Amino acid sequence: MKKCSGSVDSIETMGLVDGPGIRTVVFLTGCKLRCLYCHNPEMWTKGKDNYTPEELVKKIIRNKPYFGKKGGVTFSGGEPLLQIDFLAECSKLLKKEGINIALDTAGVGLGNYKEILDLVDLVIFDVKYTDGEGYEKLTGLDISESERFIRDLNESGKDVWIRQVIVPGLMDNLEYMDSLAKYVLKIKNVQKIEFLPFHHLGFSKFEKLGIKNPLKDTLEMDKDKCDELYNYFMKKYNELKDSL
């Protein structure tokens, strides 16, 4: 094993929304993206290393009795792919323990994704935007690295969950739903698609950190409208899928 250590912001036990079953969610620090709707800006900068793979896995194993047949560990962030050596070494140890591994990612790391994709069981892929111009406006970066990750993801054959945050004024329209349906079709082995309504829960973090909040005047996404958009999207997506 490589000798390495990683920076963990926090560890959530008994998680129920970041993958199947009951999960331990590990939030790794560092992210290249500066998403307008980010709710974890405190994780943008990589912190000091505070765990070795052995230390982290030992802590995760304590929760193993709660995982059952479906649960496990989910690596989130931040962007876990920016700590890919640490992530890989943790995953190797977890596989020896028979623990299911999910990776929650926007696909913007340091490249060399094939090794980690071989190790994980599920990828929760966070769609930011469906075209290059909108992606750059939303995240501050070019879409090319995310597309590179999708190519490696498709080759891996791993199961995928899709997540899309719906922000009023950006994604809450049928034109975007149509483009999203075409975009998601590019990704293989999609098992689940989720819409996450934009909320204000992270606003206090921007204020605390002294960071300008670009969406401070944006209303929270209406959940009923979000559900309507989701139903429209799924109908469009399934129609396109059946026509292939």
Image (tube, helix red, strand yellow):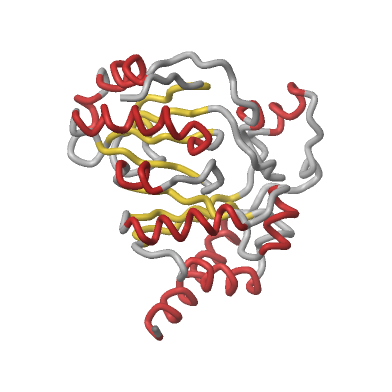
| Quadrant (top left, top right, bottom left, bottom right) of the N terminus | top left
Q: Nearer the viewer, residue 4 or 40?
A: 4
Q: Camera-side residue: 49 or 56?
A: 49
Q: Who's the residue at 77% across and 44% down the image?
A: 215
Residue farthest toward the bottom in the current orientation of the protein: 243
Name the residue: 73% across, 29% down.
Answer: 206
The percent position of residue 15, horizontal first and vertical second, equals 38, 32
Coordinates of residue 114 in the picture (x, y in percent): 38, 48
Answer left or right for 64 relative to 136.
left
Asked if 14 appears above or below 149 in the picture, the reply is above
For the C terminus, the image quarter is bottom left
For the point 34% across and 27% down, the residue is 90
Quarter location, residue 190: bottom left
**Across the whole image, how many numbered discs are drawn on residues?**
0
Extreme residue toward the front, this view: 2
Task: Please tell me in which quadrant of the rendered image residue 121 appears.
Answer: top left
Question: Measured along the vertical axis of the image, is residue 242 above or below residue 124?
Answer: below
| Residue 81 percent across, percent down from the top left | 49, 38
Counting from the top left corner in percent of width and height, residue 48 is at 56, 16
Left or right: 91 in relation to 45:
left
